[in-house]
Image: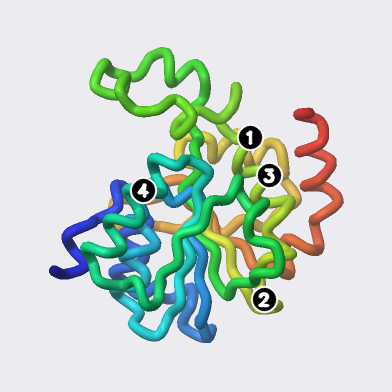
Amino acid sequence: SDARALVPRSPIAELIQGGFSPWLDERHVERALDLCTGSGCIGIAMAAHNPDWQVDLADVSDEALALARENVEFQDVGDRVEVIRSDLFAGLAGRRYDLIVSNPPYVTEQEFAALPAEYSHEPKLGLTAGADGLDFALRILVQAPEHLTDDGVLIVEVGESERALVALLPQIPFNWIEFAVGQMGVFLLDRADLVTHAAAIRAVAARRG
């Protein structure tokens, strides 16, 4: 089997296929995390394209993890890919990564209500993230620094919630990644920027209760 058997339904697939260039050109990656991994396709694709990376796949859903484990086995990357049950970073104590990639739930409650019928079988937990779609992204921004190496990088897909995130945290230098079809709501931040702006991020996250 080959890496293409599991192509993520995400613009992050384009990043993986392009070697995360130019974003990781000057960086050494040994350990990577796919947070909110779902079926595991993003993390498995990262491992398949980067034979020297160790990749952890984390999710809170037992159903997702069972599927991820099947896919790891099917893609024969089990020697380098670990599947971990974790509510965001809660089950990852002591683990640090050079790269954290996350496609967390980011559909707003309103968008979920308006989704076409074929989405009705998708678990709501896997899709919705509060009124503006940013509940998970903000928790990730708060917690990521302690799980990134000093030169570590965080990449998160927030989709249509991009505008809301910039409005909430205008002082943060989000790098919004351009794809073949334009901007797709995927940002990149260095650990240093997360640390610099940690107080602002925590304040915004705290207001949400």
Label whose residue precedes the other's in the sequence (1 or 2): 1
Q: Amino acid at mark 1?
A: Asp
Give the secondary structure at mark 1: helix
Q: Using the image, determine if residue 207 lies above or below residue 144.
A: above
Front-most of residues 186 and 136: 136
Label whose residue precedes the other's in the sequence (3 or 4): 4
From the image, which quarter does the N terminus lie in?
A: bottom left
**In whole angstroms, how far apart are the C-alphas of marks 4 and 2?**
29 Å
**Which quadrant holds residue 203?**
top right
Front position among marks 3 and 4: 4
Q: Please give the name of the residue rendered at 81% of the width and 55% of the height, measured from the top-left corner.
A: 198
Q: How would you rate the neighbour count of disc 2 (Cα within 10 Å): few for under 14, some for 14-19, many for 20 or more? A: some
Residue pointed to by mark 4: 66
Give the secondary structure at mark 2: strand
Q: Amino acid at mark 2?
A: Thr
Q: How would you rate the neighbour count of disc 1 (Cα within 10 Å): few for under 14, some for 14-19, many for 20 or more? A: some
Residue pointed to by mark 1: 135
Residue pointed to by mark 2: 149
**Which quadrant holds residue 173?**
bottom right
Label whose residue precedes the other's in the sequence (2 or 3): 3
